[in-house]
Image: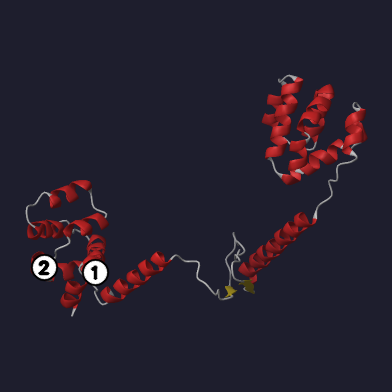
Amino acid sequence: MDKVLLKSKTKLIRWLKLDWIIILQHVQEHEFITTQEYGNLMITAPTEGVIKLLDIIHGKGENVCRNFLNLLKNDDVNEFSPELRKWIKTVDTSVQKTDKDWEKREAANRSIQETANTAGQSGIQVTSNISASDGGHVFSPIITGSTLGSFEMNMTFAPSAKSNVPANFQKHDRDCKRRENCNRSIQDYQKFLKANTSQLVQNVKNIDPILDDLDLHKESVANVRANQTRQMKMRELLDCVNCESIAKDLVNTLFKHEESLMKELQY
């Protein structure tokens, strides 16, 4: 319906401006526009006002456009223009199949929402079964304003013959998982770095890429890079570690760029 409105805009402007004030009253009566929009349109010249009104209606979506066109079908609304009356009778404003499908999905979601609200009070279990085939998408229901006794969602994904994930991303993901498995046994990252300070200072070679991967203040990075030797740079970098989160980031980055050394220190 929004497309019908857009394609017929010039004709509607020509017809509706003939009885602009009355049209505006009908539109307000059916709450197609807000009080503020009505006030702004009332002080606008007919042609410009109709243009703005049609833009407002179009911007409110499919249902409002359909309701507006249905309004124009009323004899007391279109009586001022025989051309409008003749044209509007040819416009099919019935809900099409795609619209009906959408409304069915909306009704299903409302049903799940209502069941969930009941479950929050009575402890009823809510179960949702969702499936997706190759190339499909899963849209799970959104449940708000409820405290569920229990909620179970079963999702089945049909396997794809070919992965859509880029090869470089897959490799990066495998590398991350491997590093996570390597440093999982480290419980205290700051303590680990302190205990191995001497070995790290003497043996870490890839200081620059390590700095590139760390989220440190620019001033701290500049201070590290300002040192003459890699040993001095590493010692300065270790001095920047003042909390467990930075220590963990540094350990993860060391596993990325100095994996052999870190494995030796770990075991």
Residue that appears at 52% across and 72% down: 162
- Location of residue 107 by image quarter: bottom right
Q: Which residue is mark 2?
A: 203
Q: Which residue is mark 1?
A: 255
Q: Amino acid at mark 2?
A: Asn
| Residue 79, horizontal then vertical, whole percent | 92, 29
The picture places residue 249, in percent across and down from the top left corner, at: 26, 62
Residue 162 shown left or right of residue 3 in the figure: left
Does dot 2 land on a helix, a strand or a loop? helix
Give the x, y percent position of residue 142: 60, 61
Disc 1 secondary structure class: helix
Which label sits on residue 163?
none
What residue appears at the point 75 percent right and 56 percent down from the top-left corner?
A: 98
Image location (x, y in percent) of residue 158: 59, 75
Q: Is residue 161 above or below residue 66?
A: below
How crowded pointer 2 is (Cα within 10 Å; few <14, some 14-19, many 20+) is rated as few
Distance of label 1 from label 2 (alpha carbons): 13 Å
Which is more N-terminal, label 2 or label 1? 2
Quadrant assignment, res 157? bottom right
Name the residue rendered at 80%, 42% in the picture: 67
Q: Label 1 is placed on what type of residue? A: Phe
